[in-house]
């Protein structure tokens, strides 16, 4: 049976508080952790199938033009080569899941350097690699002079969702304090540890694909469209995913190519992208140019607030990095102007990379807020506190739980923030300037439709099934806790099975909606099972007190006794209703950082960083904290090192591996302190939790930028703030 719950209003049933197992919200290690660290958890490429062939993708060595011919006959003469697949259905745009969308989009048409156009299939990886490298093909490349490659030169169009109210220009002309600043941020790569990989098997009737994907619930439709194969003839399995960060939201060519090859050759085919291919073909976070205008009264209260951004993508791509998504509701100011523009250049597809929008919008806004605090002459924390609006200033809606003020004050206290107006260069140790900075965090809260089946087995153990994924975020642990809490079971008696489209459709992992959405489906199913158990026990559900598989009513009855060998199985179906028309929902936080900057080399080291975060109910203190820490590590990367570098001549990505694209390494990351506010948010989801996955990287790079200025007096308007730029901006 299915229980459907559409959330149109705050859910004040407090379902998760009805259980007595006392594990919800606690730190629980990942149930799959041992399998992962011992190498026995199979990732997509690690499945074994008899007679598997290996496919290697061939990518375009030019920026724009047409593949005019592939000499397949010659290719097939190469050692071990079995086939060359150049089926047009292979071409998908990874970010938006454009698979099969436009039949006229030929694979022969190349839009960016590194775009896959063929798959060479051979009997071994080495032979496929060799043949892919030497595949004879001809092409006609467009004249580089005709291809827009530089974001500075591109033509832009306006994106939707813009906000205009009052008269910002007038506010800027008349307010006692103003700043008008323009920033540049560079592109980012998702840089997940596990490269994109797929193993496809075709049994003549049904296709099974082991792949590394965030959203099998959606990817199955993409694949169905691409192959023109009904969904019930497809099974996608993604049990373990070695990080996604957005790059595995949609299908990319390794999946479609492996599927097409397996169907044509009637043998299993494995395709794994090289690290360079992942960098060059998957997708990028757009670079941005952002202008922030802030006009404040004598006390620092905003009268005018402008945030304009320009981002880029390939022609015909819908996605535009939503840079202003949290700016529209974060601070007050009656004269508002927020406009996003997207321009067209021939770099690879721009798409969702962790915290799309806020990841670059918030650091810029928060760096500008630091300049305003200096201009007004007040403490930066106080400036934020004075500008927290009562209601969403753009939509006029009330907020669900709003944790920003608490995060600011609790974070400041825990960090030992020294209040008051600030001046740079107050502290020096030898050749190092030392300083501190802070920033607010905000990330919109989303929920998504989700289904999960919960079965309470006759032996008193439970099983949770959904095609939801765990991309390193902790889904297995969190769902274990929710089912265990509700059904009175120790974690070891709950089995969670994920990442298989033969299970009910989950929400997928993306946009920080995972835990709140699938958790809501599971809690609804469990609540229904509780009602059935209470019936069997002859009591009301509110009297049902279960722990460790037994009723705690003095009767010594166990779940097995109640079930009498008959399992109970319920599919929970959670659906977000109209509640988003009534509330603005966001997770909030505050970052505090201490850095040291070398006065001779401009090198910046983050010495200390603290984040205080509010995201509704904490479902698992350990995995939530890990999410916050992961986000803060990326704050360090985007503040100091991470930058996609494109060749200005032909637009190819120059730093396409982890040696040249610098994510922070262990030595770059100090102990990171995380404070989590625990405040249930009934309007957010049935489990009263909001998104946490991306929150930790929404603004922290601004705190580091502000700390650099406080340390050494270098105000910079470009992220990342590499040593050369720090030195250039450092006063004598
Ligand atoms: Mo996230 S960038 O939606 O995986």
Image (spheres, rainbow, N blue to C red):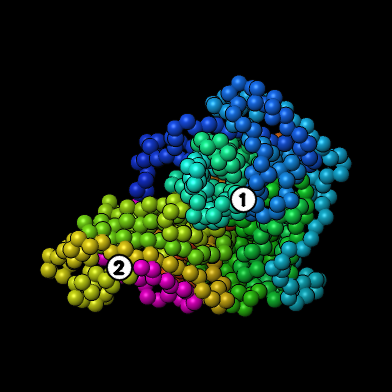
Circle 2 sits on which residue?
A: 529
The residue sitting at 58% across, 23% down in the picture is: 80
Residue appearing at x 47%, y 42% in the figure: 203
Query: Please, what secondary structure does the residue beneath circle 1 have?
Result: helix
Q: Residue, x 22% and y 59% (percent of image)?
A: 458
Front residue of 38/177: it is: 38
Q: What kind of secondary structure does the magenta stretch mostly adopt?
A: loop
Judged left or right of residue 49, residue 432 is right
Magenta residues, as a range? 1-28
Numbered-mark total: 2
| Quadrant housing the C terminus | top right
- Percent across and percent down for residue 313 are 73, 52
Foreground tag (2 vs 1): 1
Calculate the distance from the C-alpha at mark 2 to the C-alpha at mark 1. Answer: 39 Å
- The residue where tag 1 is placed is 226
Crowding around mark 1 (Cα neighbors within 10 Å: few <14, some 14 to 19, many 20+) is many
Residue 87 visible in image: yes
Identify the secondary structure beneath mark 2.
helix
- How far across and down, in percent of the image, does residue 115 sit? 69, 40
Using the rendered view, name the quadrant where residue 604 is placed.
top right
Judge the density around disc 2: few (<14), some (14-19), many (≥20) Cα neighbours within 10 Å: many
The quarter in which the N terminus is drawn is: bottom left
Query: Residue 134 has which mark?
Result: none
Report the side of 507 relative to 77 (left or right). left
Q: Decide: marks 2, 1 in contact (CB < 8 A)?
A: no
Would you say residue 11 sits in the magenta stretch? yes
In this picture, residue 556 sits left or right of residue 266: left
């Amino acid at each position: 049976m299915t229980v459907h719950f559409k959330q149109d209003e705050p859910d004040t049933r407090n379902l998760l508080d009805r259980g007595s197992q006392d594990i919800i919200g606690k730190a629980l290690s990942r149930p799959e952790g041992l399998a992962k660290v011992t190498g026995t958890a199979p990732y997509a490429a690690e499945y074994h199938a008899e007679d598997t062939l290996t496919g290697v993708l061939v990518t375009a060595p030019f920026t724009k033009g047409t593949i005019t011919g592939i000499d397949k006959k010659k290719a097939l003469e190469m050692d071990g080569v079995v086939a060359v697949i150049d089926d047009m259905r292979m071409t998908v745009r990874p970010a938006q899941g454009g698979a099969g969308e436009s039949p006229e989009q030929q694979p022969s048409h190349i839009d960016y350097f590194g775009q896959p156009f063929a798959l060479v299939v051979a009997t071994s990886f080495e032979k496929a690699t060799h043949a892919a490298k030497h595949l004879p093909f001809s092409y006609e490349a467009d004249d580089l002079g005709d291809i827009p490659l530089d974001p500075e030169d591109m033509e832009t169009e306006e994106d939707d969702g813009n906000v205009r109210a009052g008269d910002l220009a007038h506010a800027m002309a008349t307010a006692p304090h103003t700043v008008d600043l323009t920033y540049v941020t560079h592109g980012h790569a998702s840089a997940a540890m596990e490269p994109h990989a797929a193993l496809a098997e075709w049994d003549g009737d049904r296709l099974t694909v082991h792949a590394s994907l965030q959203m099998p619930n959606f990817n199955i439709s993409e694949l169905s469209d691409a192959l023109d194969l009904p969904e019930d003839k497809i099974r996608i399995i993604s049990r373990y995913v070695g990080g996604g960060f957005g790059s595995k939201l949609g299908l990319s060519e390794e999946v479609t190519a492996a599927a097409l090859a397996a169907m044509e050759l009637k043998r299993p085919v494995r395709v794994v992208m090289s690290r360079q291919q992942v960098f060059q073909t998957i997708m990028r976070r757009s670079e941005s140019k952002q202008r922030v205008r802030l006009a404040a009264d004598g006390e620092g209260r905003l009268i005018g607030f402008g945030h304009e951004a320009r981002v880029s993508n390939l022609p015909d791509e819908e996605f535009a990095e939503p840079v202003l998504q949290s700016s529209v509701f974060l601070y007050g100011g009656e004269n508002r102007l927020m406009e996003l523009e997207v321009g067209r250049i021939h770099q690879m597809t721009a798409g969702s990379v962790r915290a799309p929008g806020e990841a670059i919008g918030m650091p810029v806004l928060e760096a500008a807020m630091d300049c305003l605090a200096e201009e007004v002459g007040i403490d930066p924390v106080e400036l934020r506190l004075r500008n927290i609006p009562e209601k969403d200033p753009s939509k006029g809606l009330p907020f669900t739980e709003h944790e920003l003020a608490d995060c600011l004050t609790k974070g400041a206290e825990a960090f030992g923030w020294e209040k008051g107006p600030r001046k740079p260069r107050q502290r020096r140790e030898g050749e190092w300037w030392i300083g501190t900075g802070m920033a607010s965090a905000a990330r919109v809260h989303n929920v998504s439709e989700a289904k999960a089946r919960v079965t309470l087995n006759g032996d008193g153990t439970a099983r949770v099934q959904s095609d939801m994924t765990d991309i390193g975020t902790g889904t297995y642990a969190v769902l274990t806790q929710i089912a265990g809490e509700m059904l009175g079971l120790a974690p070891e008696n709950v089995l969670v099975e994920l990442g298989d489209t033969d299970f009910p459709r989950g929400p997928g992992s993306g946009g920080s909606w995972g835990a709140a959405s699938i958790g809501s489906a599971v809690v609804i199913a469990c609540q229904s099972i509780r009602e059935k158990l209470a019936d069997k026990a002859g009591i009301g559900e509110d009297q049902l007190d279960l722990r460790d598989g037994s009723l705690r009513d003095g009767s010594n009855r166990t779940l097995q006794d109640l079930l009498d060998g008959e399992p109970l199985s319920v599919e929970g179906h959670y659906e977000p209703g109209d509640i988003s028309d009534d509330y603005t929902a966001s997770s909030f936080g505050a970052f505090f950082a201490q850095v040291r900057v070398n006065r001779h080399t401009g090198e910046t080291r983050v010495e200390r960083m603290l984040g205080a975060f509010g995201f509704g109910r904490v479902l698992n203190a350990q995995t939530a904290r890990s999410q916050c820490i992961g986000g803060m590590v990326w704050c360090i990367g985007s503040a100091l090192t991470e930058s996609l570098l494109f060749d200005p001549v032909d637009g190819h990505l120059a730093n396409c591996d982890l040696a040249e694209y610098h994510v922070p390494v262990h030595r770059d990351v100090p102990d990171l302190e995380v404070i989590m506010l625990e405040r249930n948010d009934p309007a957010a989801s049935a489990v009263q939790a909001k998104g946490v996955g991306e929150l930790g990287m929404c603004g922290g790079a601004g705190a580091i930028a502000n700390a650099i200025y406080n340390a050494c007096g270098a105000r910079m308007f470009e992220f990342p703030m590499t040593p050369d730029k720090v030195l250039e901006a450092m006063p004598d």
